[in-house]
Image (cartoon, rainbow, N blue to C red):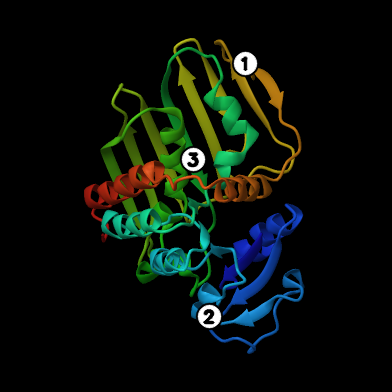
Amino acid sequence: MKFGILGEAKIAREHVVPAILNAGHEVTHVGRRDPGKVALPEIYGDAIETDYESLIKDPSVDAIYNPLPNHLHVPYSIEALKNNKHVLCEKPVALNLEELSKLQKAAEESEAFFYEAFMVRSHPQWHWLQNLDIGNYQSCHFIFSYPQQPEGNVRNLIKYGGGPLFDIGCYAILSGCMLFKGEPTVLSAVAVMCDKYETEKQVDATLRWPDGETLSFTVSANAALCQAFTVLGSNGWAKLSVPVNPPEKTSAYWSNGGLQEGIKVEFPACNHYQLMVEDFVASSLAGDDSDFVFSRRVTKAINDIQKIAGLAV
C-alpha cells in the first residue's frame, strides 16, 4: 500500500513511518506547509514533497497518515475520505462530538476505511489483559505523566487541542473502554492549571461504566515520567508494567490475590506501531466498515471531564 504522510511530526518520523516501511509498504509522498524549504529527514527516502491538499488529491496515494496537531485531525481526515483515501489518524481524533459526527458521516459516505491510531489496541499485552481470568473486573487505576514541554510545543496550546487530558487522558479512558462494556459516566474530575502555559498541567478523574466498574486516572504534563496500570478483579489483580509506550520486550504481573509481586508474564518482542499498521491495512483491503464506538466514548468522556473540571471546551 502507498502511504502519504501529512506533516512532519515527530511520532511519524520516529515511530509510524518506520512501522509502515517495516510492514512492507511504501511512503511515497509527504505533505508539508512549506514544501522544499527544509530537506526531508532520511527516513522518507525518495518520497515526493508536496502540500497537504495536493497530497490528499493525488490518485497514486492509497492511504493517508494524519499526525497533524489535534485541531487538524478532523478537517484533513474528512478531505482524505472524500477523495477515497484510507485514513490512519492520530489520537485524539476529535476535540468534540460535533466534529466527530462530521467525520463519521464522511467515513460512512466514503469507500475508504478510517482508523484512530491507538497503537495500544494492537499490543499483545492488552489482548492478554482483556482475556485474563481474575473474576469480574471491578476497577482499574491508570497513571501517565511526563515532564513539562518547551514553550511553543503544540501540547501547550489550547487552540491546537493541547493539554494532557487530550494528549494522554485519551489513553486512560480508552483503557476502561477496552475492559468494560458500554458508555462511561464521569463521576468526578479535577484539573490543576499550568502556571506557565494556558493548558492544564494535571487532571484527576473517576469514571463509572453501566455495570458498576470504575476507572480512576491521573494524567500530568508537568511531573516525572511515569506509566502504570492496575486492574482489580473479584478473584485477582493484574498490572501492566508500561501500558502505553512499552519497550520491544515488556512484561506484566498478575495474581489470584496477595501482596507479593505476583506471576510475571513476558510478551514476545514486538512493535505495536507496526502491528497497528498491519491491522489498519488488513481492514482497509478487506473493505471493513469504520468503527467509531470507542472514539465517541472517549471524546464524550473528555468533554464531560472538561465541563466538570472547569476547563475550556
* Quarter of the rendering occupied by the N terminus: bottom right
Residue that numbered label 2 is attached to = 54
Residues at discs 2 and 1 in contact (Cβ within 8 Å): no
Residue for point 37% across, 41% down? 293
Residue that numbered label 1 is attached to = 260
The amino acid on which the numbered mark 3 sits, given as a three-letter code, is: Ile
Residue for point 49% across, 51% down? 115
Provide residue 194's location: percent of width, then percent of height: 38, 61
Provide residue 180's location: percent of width, then percent of height: 40, 28
Residue for point 53% across, 70% down? 150
Residue that numbered label 3 is attached to = 143
> What is the secondary structure assignment of the residue under circle 3?
strand
| Position of residue 267 in the picture relative to residue 292 (left or right) | right
Looking at the picture, does residue 67 appear above or below residue 208? below
Crowdedness near tag 2: few (<14), some (14–19) or many (≥20) residues, C-alpha within 10 Å: few
* Quarter of the rendering occupied by the C terminus: bottom left
